Each structure stands twice: as structure tokens, then as C-alpha cells.
Amino acid sequence: GVCGSFKDSVRRDLVEYLARYRRDALADHPWKRWAELEPADAEAGHRMPGGQSRWSQGKDLSWEPLRPELVVEVAYEHMQGRRFRHLAQFRRWRPDKKPSDCTYDQLEVVPPLELAVIFASGR
């Protein structure tokens, strides 16, 4: 997925660190299908990394696939289906974890607050 950006000094270091994960990155990548779609597919309403949205306003949102071998810990506001709602915030690298150990099942599910409850509290 995508998480918040890093400081410029950290980005420079990341280019070198992540370079080894670029080779053959799409071979088993979970977003491989999206990488092979044409821009017109994104315009047809398919949500995908790098695709335009009402928030992107024509910005270049190109992305660089990496082999899915690294694990990071992130903080997040909440999930909407299988997507982080809003940007996830990078916390730390997790070399002690394998990607296969990390699933949506382990995430805390916080039930949404019902609007009726929120508005009733002001009475």
C-alpha cells in the first residue's frame, strides 16, 4: 500500500536501499494487474495505484513497484474494506516479520460510530 511521505534526506537514502527490490518487482506483485492496465482503464472508474481521482487534479501519481519482501509498521485512522482510509503513517521497519505473517485479519477493527448516537448526545 501507500503511506505518508518521508523527509528529503530519508528519501535519498531510500533510493539506494530500495533499489535491490526493484528487479523483477512485478513478477509476483499484488498490483501487477493494475500496472498492466492502460490509462483509459483508470479513467473508466477503476481504482488503482497511480490512477487519477477527484483529489489528484492531474498530478503525476506514478508509482514504482517493489518486490513485496519488506514489512513496515504503520499507524492508520481506520480501514474501509481492505483499504486504509486516508494515508497510513510509517512507524518503523519490521525485519522480524515476514510479509506472509501480515494479514488484514490481525488489524484491530473499530466499529463505526452511528450518526444517531453522535447527534443524540447533543440533546
Image (cartoon, helix red, strand yellow):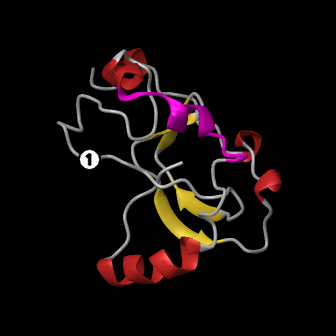
Residue 120 falls in image quadrant: top left
Looking at the image, is 123 positioned above or below residue 99? above
Residue displayed at 76% across by 56% down: 99
> Which x, y percent locates residue 87?
41, 49
Callout 1 secondary element: loop
Q: Which residues are magenta?
A: 27-39
> Which x, y percent locates residue 73?
61, 63
Look at the image and say whether residue 65 sits in the magenta stretch.
no
Judged left or right of residue 46, residue 99 is right
Looking at the image, is 2 positioned above or below residue 58? below
> Which x, y percent locates residue 98?
80, 62
Name the kind of residue labelled 1 in the image: Asp
Quarter of the rendering occupied by the C terminus: top left
What crowding class fits label 1: few (fewer than 14 Cα within 10 Å), some (14-19), or many (20 or more)? Answer: few
Residue displayed at 31% across by 78% down: 8
Residue displayed at 37% across by 48% down: 62
Residue displayed at 30% across by 32% down: 52
Residue that badge 1 annotates: 60
> Which x, y percent locates residue 39?
36, 28
In this view, the residue farthest toward the left is 57
